Image (spheres, helix red, strand yellow):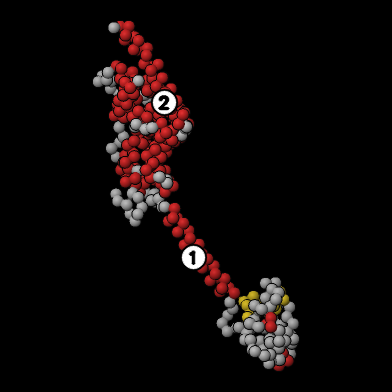
């Protein structure tokens, strides 16, 4: 879709950000349809608020912060609190995965959505602490400490199995 | 540490591969956005607002100008010197006047405040038209003088 009369086209501006927005949403919500709903609502909000964005080069962190806020809003709703969210990797086929990978996947699932969010942004999307802080809506210090705390929790979750494996060896 | 980080990266890759987005997600979003109006830049909104304000101001001033005007040919002429006399008008005529024609003798008093008086569409309780005199010092509006009036009109509220 091309721009019409100088107006930016949705596909040109928001389109390239959808896949990363979806990755963020599915990381926070662990549910495809909920993640797609969150991305849809966030995309429309971003589209409407686009003229207020001064620095177009910062559009990705700006868009991802809208998606993160939308995910938080969805998690706060009553239906979400009573809905039993299906565990992602309980349904997914596991035969092709290494047991260590399975442990890490489950350990990630046991983290809170905000901890998964900062890990995704920093380690998967290669964002800086500052960008992570902007998207998560916290200070840079808090973002850094949240990332390290999440790493500590992951290690603590994985250590018992590693110790068991070493004992067997 | 680095090993854990790379494992985390791979784990997120697996998670996203396990729950891929619907193939038509982008198309759905594009369609949903297309149903809404495209965003406008701030200067466009300001220009539209300014244009509407300008149109409103012009309309208001035109309405105001038309409201202030009276019917055609009702402006009382302003002779250079007072020539007519109120006594020339019928002294028996005390009924309410409805004619928009200039009142003879209006300048008989020689008062400058009656120069350029125009009859308006307003009426008093007796049906007499109310006149508008732009040079009058107080209120600009006067009852129409009775036929035998010597020019001492009574001011009414504007």
* Disc 2, SS: helix
Residue A15 at x, y percent in the picture: 32, 42
Which residue is nearer to you in this view: A16 or B108?
A16
Name the side, left or right, on which A91 lies relative to B146: left
- Seen at 48% across and 58% down, the residue is B49
Residue A23, by quadrant, is: top left
Q: Position of residue B66 (x, y in %)?
A: 56, 74
Residue sitting at 28 percent across and 37 percent down? Answer: B23
Q: Quadrant of the N terminus of chain B?
A: top left
Seen in the picture, residue B62 relative to A42 is either above or below; the reply is below
Which image quadrant for residue B157?
bottom right
Q: Nearer the viewer, mark 2 or mark 1?
A: 2
The number of numbered badges drawn on the structure is 2
Q: Is residue B144 above or below residue A84?
A: below
Q: Is residue B69 visible?
A: yes
Q: Which mark is on residue A147? A: 2
Chain identifier of the residue bearing label 1 in the image: B
Judge by depth and name the residue closer to the eye, B151 or A100.
A100
Location of residue B9 (image quadrant)? top left
Does residue A27 appear anywhere in the picture?
no
Cβ atoms at labels 2 and 1 below 8 Å apart: no
The Cα atoms of the two marked residues, 2 and 1, are separated by 57 Å
Chain letter of mark 2 equals A
Q: Residues within 10 Å of mark 2 (few under 14, many from 20)?
A: many
Q: Which mark is residue B55?
A: 1
């Amino acid at each position: 879709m091309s721009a019409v009369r100088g107006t930016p086209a949705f596909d040109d501006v928001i389109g390239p950000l959808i896949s990363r927005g979806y990755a963020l949403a599915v990381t926070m919500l662990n549910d495809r349809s909920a993640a797609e709903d969150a991305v849809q609502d966030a995309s429309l909000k971003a589209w409407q608020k686009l003229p207020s964005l001064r620095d177009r080069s910062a559009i990705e962190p700006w868009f991802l912060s809208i998606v993160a806020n939308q995910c938080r809003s969805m998690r706060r709703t009553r239906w979400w609190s009573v809905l039993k969210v299906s565990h992602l990797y309980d349904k997914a086929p596991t035969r092709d995965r290494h047991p260590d990978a399975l442990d890490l996947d489950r350990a990630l699932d046991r983290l809170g959505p905000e901890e998964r969010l900062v890990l995704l942004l920093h380690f998967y999307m290669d964002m800086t602490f500052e960008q992570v802080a902007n998207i998560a809506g916290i200070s840079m210090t808090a973002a850094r400490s949240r990332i390290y705390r999440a790493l500590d929790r992951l290690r603590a979750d994985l250590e018992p199995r590693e110790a068991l494996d070493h004992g067997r060896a | 540490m680095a090993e854990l980080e790379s494992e985390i990266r791979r784990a997120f890759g697996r998670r996203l591969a396990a729950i891929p987005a619907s193939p038509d997600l982008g198309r759905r979003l594009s369609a949903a956005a297309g149903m809404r109006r495209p965003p406008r830049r701030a200067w466009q909104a300001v220009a539209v607002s300014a244009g509407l304000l300008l149109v409103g101001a012009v309309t208001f001033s035109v309405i105001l100008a038309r409201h202030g005007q009276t019917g055609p040919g009702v402006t009382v002429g302003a002779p250079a010197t007072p020539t007519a006399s109120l006594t020339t008008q019928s002294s028996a005529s005390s009924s309410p006047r409805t004619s928009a024609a200039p009142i003879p003798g209006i300048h008989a008093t020689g008062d400058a405040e009656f120069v350029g008086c125009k009859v308006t569409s307003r009426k008093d309780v007796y049906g007499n038209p109310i006149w508008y005199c732009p040079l009058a010092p107080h209120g600009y509006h006067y009852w129409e003088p009775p036929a035998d009036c010597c020019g001492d009109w009574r001011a009414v509220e504007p």
